[in-house]
Amino acid sequence: MTNPVITEVTDRVVARSRESRGAYLKRVRRAGAELRERGPARGRLGCANLAHGFAAAPAEDKLDLRGTAKPGVAIVTSYNDMLSAHQPYETYPPELKRAVREAGGVAQVAGGVPAMCDGVTQGRAGMELSLYSRDVIAMATAIALSHDMFDAALLLGVCDKIVPGLLIGALHFGHLPAIFVPAGPMTSGLPNKVKARARQSFAEGKIGRLEMLDAEAASYHSPGTCTFYGTANSNQLLMEVMGLHLPGATFVNPHTELRHALTGAAARRAVEITPHGAEYTPVAEIVDEKAIVNAVVALLASGGSTNHTMHLVAMAAAAGIELTWDDMAALSKVVPLITRMYPNGQADVNHFQAAGGMPVFIGDLLDAGLLHEDVLTVAGRGLALYRSTPALKEGALVWQERTEPSADTEVLRPVAEPFSPDGGIHMLSGNLGRAVSKVSAVKPAHLVIEAPAKVFDDQLDLLTAFERGELDGQDFVAVVRYQGPQANGMPELHKLTPPLAVLLDRGQQVAIVTDGRMSGASGKVPAAIHLSPEAADGGPIALVRDGDVIRLDSAAGTLTVLADLTGRTPGGAPLTDEQWAGTGRELFASFRRTVGPAERGASVFGGAA
């Protein structure tokens, strides 16, 4: 039986979205009906259009593309060989094309999308383009699919903004089936506890750059997704819970026999669910209100990335669904935290996989009534299909239902014995606005912080103050403002975590309040992030001064400045367009003027699709 709060929130989302969702479905269903009636999409193209579409194809594919007997499958790839998570995609197009051909279709790489590495750009000017890149990726996906040659799509993406962007773009072609094809995490490297200790030692000046680089290189050491549970792996977990991966495909390592088998299976399945088969499964019907609520539940139960408090809102909007932070707050009260992966614990995603991974995680949440089972997925009807785990038997890919419980309850626990009775992400509100707090890695003693503000308008100013010893021996709340979507693209401020963690370990009471982001790698430092309205949009954070006492109570869900702000004028200011230049940032000046607030998904697209 479904938990009554899950049902209540879902019903609220359905009611709120009735008009926008109805308009969206009317549009995509009309396109889907036309596709089913007329056969493969390319059959509607004029001769010159179609000739351009297959001019460079190999002879075997050219014959198929000239005709209309076989469905066409688009491959949209985010391959580059700088992102470790995306490097395995180099070999995917030929594999996918072969598998599609075997299944009776024909596949083409329809386009590529940009894929920046937040790990490279942390603390750099390029990070100020990171969040904007999600919407660029959505537009690039739309450009790839706009050729109107295709009956289904295979989406190749893993990290941060890339998966949300691919899905937003695909949902604007919601009549097409779409399957995400993961690449898997790299094998475990340097233990997360050792890496975190090295970062704090480096921040304190106890080790040098070469020693720090050795530690980082031992952690990030091979092709595959970074193994900590940040936004990239949160993306992967959510895609499976939403039914957009094949069951159990998420956390299989790259370049293994099982990984290759799953890649081929995704391609074959894409052919089976085109409009011209017996199992037509458009992505618009998969991403419905129940799937969105399932995604929020999974995010909370896993202690996933705070970035998804924005991405899920934006992805839902692309499907005509209005999801709010209030929905997330309501769900957080009844969804327990049942995983511990770094930064919420010392385990990584490989340990989660070894403990039972997605089949155990999904199965236990289903049994507890915390997930909707009656949903459509790329594997078929019903989320119970995702209780199964893939395996190779005599070279053939099979799925077997996983009936064993978690093999390691220090990493993955049943709902009845959670790490915490509520979700790992709390929503905060008060006279400073609304914010997000990731509490899954914060010690109970640090859930409530009341201390004077130290105000910074740039993260580098805080780092400089730390290096000079100006933050030593005192309790404070670091207020880092003018970091929101309108101000400078809302960069992740993850580089602030090590120095603040050093001060926390010294016994100081410290926290951070910001209209910027701290990412899926947010750690043990109490934080109120994504503060909305932001300083650049007239938010009260612009009125805070050094010494104002701020109370951050993540347990109660409140964020309050204990000072009278009446009559104050804003301090500081966002960068001007002239100042916000270099590293290509000037190209995105129009995004700063059109982007919405964090609470509404920080999107340049406005409301629902």
Image: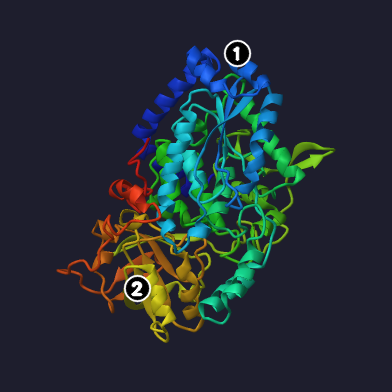
Image spot of residue 404 (x, y percent): 74, 51
Q: Quadrant of residue 480?
A: bottom left
- What SS does tag 2 mark? strand
Image spot of residue 124 (x, y percent): 44, 62
**Label 2 amino acid?**
Arg
Q: Is residue 591 left or right of residue 63?
A: left
Q: Quadrant of residue 570?
A: bottom left
Question: Dot 2: within a 10 Å radius of its alpha carbon, few (fewer than 14), some, or many (20 or more) residues?
Answer: many
Please give the residue where the numbered disc 2 appears in the rendered image.
551
Q: Quadrant of residue 195?
A: bottom right
Question: Dot 1: within a 10 Å radius of its alpha carbon, few (fewer than 14), some, or many (20 or more) residues?
Answer: few
Q: Earlier in the sequence, mark 2 or mark 1?
A: 1
Image spot of residue 497 (x, y percent): 48, 70
Q: Is residue 512 left or right of residue 197?
A: left
Residue at 64% across / 70% down in the picture? 214
Q: Which of the numbered marks, if any, corresponds to residue 67?
A: 1
**Image position of 388 with respect to 212: above or below:** above
Q: Nearer the viewer, mark 2 or mark 1?
A: 1
Q: Is residue 314 left or right of residue 244?
A: left
Where is the C terminus found, in terms of image quarters?
top left
Image spot of residue 177 (x, y percent): 55, 29
Visible residue check, residue 79: yes
Residue at 66% across / 30% down in the picture? 97
